[in-house]
Image (cartoon, rainbow, N blue to C red):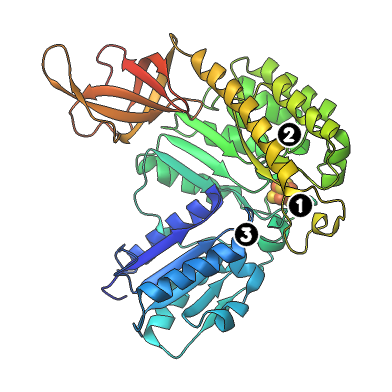
Amino acid sequence: MQDRGFHIITFGCQMNVHDSQWLARAFTARGLAESTLEEARVIVVNTCSVREKPEQKVMSTLGRIRQLRAGESDLLVAVTGCVAQQLGTEFFEREPLVRLVAGSDGIASAPAAIERLLEDPTLRLSLLDFSSHYIEREAGAQGPCGPMAHVNIMQGCDNFCAYCIVPFTRGRQKSRLSDAILSECRQRLAQGAREICLLGQNVNAFGRDSHGDGLSFAQLLRQVAALPGLERLRFVTPHPKDMDAEDVAAFADLPQLCPRLHLPLQAGSDAVLKRMGRRYDSADFLRLVEALRAARPDLALSTDLIVGFPGESEADFQATLDMVRACGFMSSFSFCYSDRPGTRASRFLDKIAPEVQQDRLLRLQALQDELGQAWLAARVGGTTTLLLEGKSPKPGSPDTDGARLTSWQGRDPYGVPVHVLLPEQAGLEGHMIAVNIVEAKKHSLLAEAVGETW
Ligand code: SF4
């Protein structure tokens, strides 16, 4: 393509990060180098509409780009992802810099569209249609990856939870064909990945639509776990109502499946769960947690929680606190409810005052901090295995023999960042090493290597 490079700004979830990484590889395969916001000819803003004020965030980012790059007529700005899907061609009117709008399914064609736009500066393009099937992306764009790889297994969601915009922005559920998933996993492992995380908005509903090839989620887990070279397997984000006995059994049977599960609870009150349209109640959730812990006694759970959903009473909120305690979550993402256009909850009239929401959020987060720190502290003195990601920004120190040690960061099987001092030595990235945990920090652990296992 051109020589001045591309720059991608990413908002939102792991799916968006994954999409941005794929876009970067697709641009690189077309000869475009990664560049800075100040220099790049192509700037992509990959948007998310799940968190608060998504539209304002995107518009202010576009405003910042306009100021920074004023008067540069060959600049090409593209908006992709959920907000692009939502606002569509409105972007062309609101921000003249924007020449491409690509929604969730349109991202697959964005690199080719950008190529066309670079050739013809008079064009503007929109890629907003939902496809009737899972769109495979250019495999040629799958360049090198780190020790941890993300592999998409499905797109969209059919659940229409009352507060959620995903079914509108990402479209209806479409499972990917298992051959394509397994072949991408094999490719990632051949490129040096040791850990694979399977991604989907409702990941464990994989196979339960008319687009897959009949393989269930649990069967897929078993097939991926059996791939040579795979050390760790994770998946995100499952829906509690879709966790069946086979999924639970996978935690007992597959040592590669990490003992950490992110299981969104959203609220502890049955009345609120019902209004949210989650299709489980607190007793169902607790039964599931019990079954998972019976299958995998060392399992740690994390969750998502919405505070101040319309109509939530103080007693409802207390039920959330009770559930958080009962489940002993190691961590959680918690947010105050806010409207997303077009969702059912946006039309509920009994909204909770922002100051009440904020007060509840702080109380919930204080409880979660307590639980999270207790969980980390309980790990001190134990041993674990780290998958080394790279050198950490923390300074090194001389060891007892005077040789220089460097601080490395790795992840344990729970996905917790762990810092460990190792000799200055190239090529440790991607190694698995055994460590003793010596100290718990607020969100991470410090450890010492066990012998010279690297
Ligand atoms: S399961 Fe509910 S919260 Fe999750 S993506 Fe689907 S609609 Fe949104």
Q: Contact, CB < 8 Å: mark 2 with mark 1?
A: no
Q: Quadrant of the C terminus?
A: top left
| Amino acid of disc 3 | Lys
Secondary structure of the residue carrying tag 1 is: loop
**Mark closer to the observer (2, 1):** 1
Residue at 85% from the left image edge and 31% from the top image edge: 315
Question: With 207 as the anchor, is 414 left or right in this view?
Answer: left
Q: Quadrant of the N terminus?
A: bottom left
Q: Residue beneath label 1, please? A: 163
Q: Earlier in the sequence, mark 2 or mark 1?
A: 1
Find residue 23 and report its horizontal and vertical position in percent. Answer: 44, 62
Picture quadrant where residue 223 is located: top right
Residue 273 drawn at (x, y percent): 83, 39
- Image quadrant assignment for residue 339: bottom right
Q: Determine whether, in the image, residue 412 is placed left or right of residue 364.
A: left
Q: Secondary structure at mark 3?
A: loop
In the rendered image, the vertical position of residue 377 relative to residue 221, given as above or below: above
- Circles 3 and 1, Cβ within 8 Å, touching? The answer is no
Q: Which residue is mark 2?
A: 243
| The residue positioned farthest toward the front in the image shown | 355
Q: Is residue 330 left or right of residue 428?
A: right
Camera sees residue 207: no
Residue 250 placement (x, y as % from top left): 64, 26
Mark 1 vs ligand 1: CB below 8 Å: yes
Farthest left residue?
A: 402
Residue type at mark 1?
Tyr
Q: Can see residue 90?
A: yes
Q: Label 3 belongs to which residue?
A: 53
- Where disc 2 sits, the SS reads loop
Q: Position of residue 332 (x, y in %)?
A: 61, 33
